[in-house]
Image (cartoon, rainbow, N blue to C red):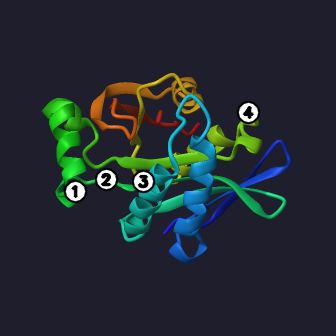
Amino acid sequence: MTAERNSSVDGQVEVRVVHSVDRMLSPETVEQIYAAASAQAPLSEPAVVATMYAGLYARARAAPGLAMAIAVDEGSPVGFAYGHDWSWGEQTDAWSTQLRERLGDNAAQRIAGSYAVELLAVLPAASGMGVGRRLLEELVDTAKSDTAWLQTTDVDSPARRLYRRAGWRTLGHGPDAPNGSPGLVLMHERTPTTDS
């Protein structure tokens, strides 16, 4: 198991990555942060979407390779990202089946054995400070796989702009997002480092 890691953003917001479920945020806290982050335009999502994502997170807490990056400012969480190892053989739910169908076999095989970033959210008060980027980087850096993927809404949003700036590329469309539009599946491949 990878050790817990800590870092800071601009010396104020601390980002830590945890692998133990008892050190992760509760589903209720995930719901609160996501609800606040997604209530504003352009997403303008109703609170029921945050409740749905909190339920998905509660079920994902048993997933292999689960990790959560948590941003904390003055002792309170202001953002998070979580993910887990991805194996098509373990994904038998309707959403995963639709994901595979919409991506097609070639694209679906590109994320086999990868790391799935399930959700990222930052409170509005902490947005624009690089917190989202740091959460994403720290989470993906802990993954065993050099390939990571995520699904976001196919609308121009701060999250989508963050992913693009961080080098995530479009793989295809996945299941519909909560707004009814097809979800946009993005992929990132870590560049191997060479030791001198």
Question: Disc 1 and disc 2: Cα gap in Å?
Answer: 8 Å
Q: Tags 2 and 4 in contact by the CB under 8 Å rule? A: no
Residue at point 62% right, 36% down? 40
- The residue under label 2 is 86
- The residue under label 4 is 128
Which x, y percent locates residue 93?
A: 20, 57
Q: Which quadrant holds residue 17? A: bottom right
Q: Earlier in the sequence, mark 1 or mark 4?
A: 1
- The residue under label 3 is 144
Q: Earlier in the sequence, mark 3 or mark 1?
A: 1
Q: Is residue 149 visible?
A: yes
Above or below: residue 7 compared with residue 1: above
Which x, y percent locates residue 102?
A: 19, 33
The residue type indicated by label 2 comes to Trp
The residue type indicated by label 1 comes to Gln
Question: Disc 3 and disc 1: Cα gap in Å?
Answer: 19 Å
